[in-house]
Image (tube, helix red, strand yellow):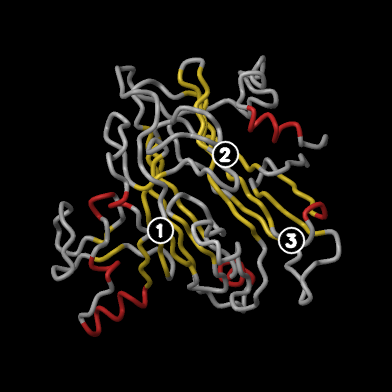
């Protein structure tokens, strides 16, 4: 088993035709403020429009939480944020943050990677549950998020009127809800400066979905679903020059007992990032014994090399060309 400190990495590929693009720096958008709580099953977790899971840093009065079981007051995760990076020519471009200075802003990107002049109109996390849809069918009263479902930004729709170019509730269109509750938002990494990494933007648009399944807990599979949350990211590279050797990662900070009592681990075959607490819990009621992230396979068109920090095709000199933030994570690895 290979031991990691914080990062769980997947491979993804992207390519684009070379052309003249927008200036390399980011836009002038203010950071997003919107967030919503996903709590349809045995978990409660805040989801923030800048991609942060578990920590509503926009509201200092609220502590980080990934409460499981919901209502117990016990949390197994501090925060999770997406990391994305790749090469444009010989330049490494990366969007990553840990606990502040987040490098995603609300809204989509133009076809050439230009961010909105003002990201504020997109600063929203839409939330729709199956209960919301059932209430609309029974009473005709729709929640604001059901009425204003952002289909024009890419939010998935069940087409009830045969017209893919509209969203008409009265004609039968409905938000496509995964599981029992779906949260949806769109963000980009070009809306502002990258203060955490010092990088120029990758120019990535991310349509994100968080959802939960309220499953019966009488079976192993049902219990696994009931005490888990699921996430789907549709990432579109909007740069005008080829993006090569791109990696997606999750910065996952567990909240299991004392900081130095955790054992982080990674399995290359199954892609879970596993955290196990080995010391006395600090909570009087006890903390969860373990928590983690499992990532499904990314759907992409091109084969990619393995981790350039190991022995992949670009291993020679790869670490020297890697951003210091990733060098720091690599230095914290333990040998097999």
Residue sitting at 35 percent across and 42 percent down?
A: 29
Which of disc 3 and disc 2 is earlier in sequence?
A: 2
Image location (x, y in percent) of residue 299? 45, 40
Disc 1 vs disc 2: Cβ atoms closer than 8 Å? no
Image location (x, y in percent) of residue 215? 52, 74
Residue 313's place in the image compared with 105, above or below, is: above
Query: How far apart, in angstroms, are the residues tagged by discs 1 and 2?
Result: 27 Å
Circle 3 packing at 10 Å, graded few (<14), some (14-19), many (20+), is many
Query: How far apart, in angstroms, are the residues tagged by discs 1 and 3?
Result: 27 Å
Residue sitting at 69 percent across and 23 percent down?
A: 311
| 209 left or right of 63 in image | left
Q: Which mark is residue 129?
A: none
**Residue to which mark 1 is pinned:** 34
| 256 left or right of 174 in image | right
Circle 1 packing at 10 Å, graded few (<14), some (14-19), many (20+), is some
Q: Which mark is residue 10?
A: 2
Residue sitting at 79 percent across and 59 percent down?
A: 258
Label 2 or label 3, whichever lies nearer to me, is 3
């Amino acid at each position: 088993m290979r031991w990691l400190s914080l990062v769980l990495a997947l491979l993804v590929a992207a390519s684009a035709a070379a052309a003249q693009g927008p200036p390399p720096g980011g836009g002038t958008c203010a950071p997003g403020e919107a967030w919503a709580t996903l709590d349809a099953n045995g978990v409660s977790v805040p989801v923030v429009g800048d991609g942060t899971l578990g920590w509503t840093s926009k509201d200092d009065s609220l502590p980080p939480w990934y409460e499981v079981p919901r209502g117990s007051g016990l949390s197994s995760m501090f925060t999770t944020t997406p990391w994305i990076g790749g090469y444009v020519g010989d330049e490494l471009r990366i969007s990553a943050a840990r606990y502040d200075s987040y490098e995603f802003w609300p809204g989509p990107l133009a076809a050439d990677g230009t961010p909105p002049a003002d990201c504020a109109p997109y600063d929203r996390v839409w939330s729709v549950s199956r209960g919301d849809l059932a209430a609309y069918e029974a009473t005709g009263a729709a929640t604001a998020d059901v009425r204003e479902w952002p289909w024009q930004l890419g939010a998935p729709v069940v087409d009830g009127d045969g017209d893919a170019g509209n969203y008409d509730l009265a004609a039968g269109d409905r938000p496509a809800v995964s599981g029992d509750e779906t949260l949806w938002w769109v963000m980009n990494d070009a809306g502002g400066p990258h203060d955490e990494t010092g990088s120029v933007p990758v120019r990535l648009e991310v349509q994100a979905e968080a959802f939960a399944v309220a499953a019966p807990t009488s079976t192993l599979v049902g219990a696994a679903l009931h005490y888990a949350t699921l996430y789907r990211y549709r990432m579109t590279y909007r740069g005008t020059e080829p993006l090569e050797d791109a990696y997606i990662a999750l910065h996952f900070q567990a909240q299991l007992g004392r900081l130095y009592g955790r054992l982080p681990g990674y399995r290359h075959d199954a892609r879970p990032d596993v955290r196990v607490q080995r010391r006395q819990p600090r909570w009087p009621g006890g903390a969860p014994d373990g928590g983690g992230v499992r990532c499904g396979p990314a759907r992409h068109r091109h084969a990619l090399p393995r981790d350039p920090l190991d022995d992949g095709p670009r291993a020679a000199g790869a670490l020297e060309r890697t951003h210091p933030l990733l060098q720091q994570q690599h230095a914290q690895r333990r040998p097999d």
